[in-house]
Amino acid sequence: MTEEQALQKLAALCSQSEHCTSEMKEKMTRWGIDEDAQQRVVEYLVANRYVDDRRYARSFVNDKLKYNKWGPRKIEQSLWMKHIDESILREALDDVDNEEYISVLRPLLTSKRKTTKAETDYEMNQKLLRFAIGRGFTFEQVKEVIDDVDE
């Protein structure tokens, strides 16, 4: 595949949905495009606003919170794995208020409590804590919701 073909294909892809620069580089590496050409293509895509890591990070955070019910830790790890710059990552996560995470976590734990078997309240809370931590929520967020539900 030539540099021009890659540029056209990636521009079409980016016009359909949000992508980050590392995804573009991965695709071009798979297509066998050399590093210099990759750099030129990425610079073109960024300059023409096809790719914007800041915009990508914001939409990624909102989508993962809203649709996947992920907490801040899991979202942060996913963005880190996509090689999003630390400052952009922090900014996107800081845009979301702690209350938004709590409002997602509360119904999640309420429904999980109904389907989880436990002999004691302590055992139930441990299971809910493990579940929520696995979803990427912080201990403080989980504790706040569990304390509210127990009252």
Image (cartoon, rainbow, N blue to C red):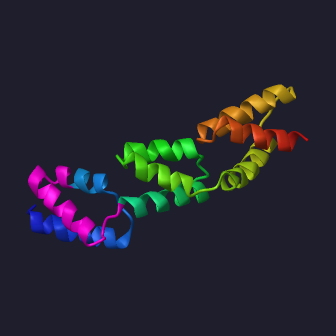
- Image coordinates of residue 95 in percent, x first then y, are 56, 58
- Image coordinates of residue 88 in percent, x first then y, are 42, 53
Q: Measuring 75% from the left and 45% from the top, which residue is drawn there?
A: 109
Q: Which residues are magenta?
A: 28-52
Q: Measuring 16% from the left and 56% from the top, which residue is drawn there?
A: 39
* Helix, strand or loop: magenta stretch: helix
125 w.r.t. 52: above or below = above
- Image coordinates of residue 107 in percent, x first then y, are 75, 52
Q: Is residue 2 magenta?
A: no
In terms of image quadrants, where is residue 42?
A: bottom left
Q: Is residue 48 magenta?
A: yes
Q: Is residue 15 left or right of residue 116?
A: left
Q: Is residue 15 left or right of residue 140?
A: left
29 w.r.t. 127: above or below = below
Quarter of the image where the N terminus is located: bottom left
Quarter of the image where the C terminus is located: top right
Q: Measuring 70% from the left and 37% from the top, which residue is drawn there?
A: 140
In terms of image quadrants, where is residue 116?
A: top right
Q: Is residue 68 left or right of residue 149?
A: left
- Image coordinates of residue 71 in percent, x first then y, are 60, 46
